[in-house]
Image (cartoon, rainbow, N blue to C red):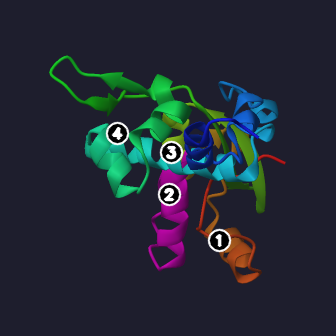
Amino acid sequence: MSRSPRRDRRARELGFGSASEQANAPLRITGPKSLARLPDAAQRVRADVLDVVAGMRRERTELGTAAGRASMSPDVVRYYAGPALRDEPGGGTFAMPADRLYRPMVIISNGELVEVDVRGSRVASTVSAYWNAVEQYLEGDDDALRPFVGVRVAGYELEADGEVIEELARRGGFSFESIYRLAD
């Protein structure tokens, strides 16, 4: 047990049980092994942080505003996504145009859900746009998947055959709750 209730409170905000548990965690998440060393709660907080940073980039929003919308402290966003942020000379902290943060994600390839390791916001944006297109297709937009024909992510070709996606959806093969996966 930590001697500092304040440090424990901050650690819990980051998804750790205590400051000592946080102290034993990796400082930077660089791949699946370092992510797996985080407790599940910390992995979920980190996934939420990645969503906040994507929103900052998309909406050109300042850190304090974006963190507040997500009901999290700007310090939490800095802790997990510091390299993706920059302080502007005129004031405010904004997301860099792109980053190389590690993200474990899920795609559909060859009719199956596939877990992939993604490094970088640009590839993550492609996966996000793909899932949006899958959802649009299932809602009746027959052309939504067309931009993803032949697109590869982490060595896997994204499934662009609507019939295959419909079958997978019919079997309850996926949900749109989160495209990020937790480490095993």
Residue at the disc numbered 4: 57
* Residue 94 percent across, percent down from the top left: 31, 31
Residue at the disc numbered 2: 146
> Could you tell me how far apart the alpha carbons at marks 3 and 4 are, in whole angstroms?
12 Å
* Residue 48 percent across, percent down from the top left: 53, 51
Ranked by sequence position, the earlier of labels 3 and 4 is 3
Of 57 and 9, nearer the camera is 9
Secondary structure beneath label 1: loop
Evaluate if marks 2 and 4 touch, with contact meaning CB atoms under 8 Å apart.
no
Give the numbered dot on residue 49: 3
Q: Is residue 162 magenta?
A: no
Q: Nearer the viewer, mark 2 or mark 3?
A: 3
Evaluate if marks 4 and 1 touch, with contact meaning CB atoms under 8 Å apart.
no
Q: Which image quadrant is residue 177 in?
A: bottom right
> Could you tell me how far apart the alpha carbons at marks 4 and 1 are, in whole angstroms?
25 Å
Residue at 54%, 76% (x, y): give it.
138
> Could you tell me how far apart the alpha carbons at marks 3 and 1 are, in whole angstroms?
20 Å
Name the outermost residue toward the bottom: 170
Residue at 77%, 52% (x, y): give it.
114
Q: Which residues are magenta?
A: 127-147
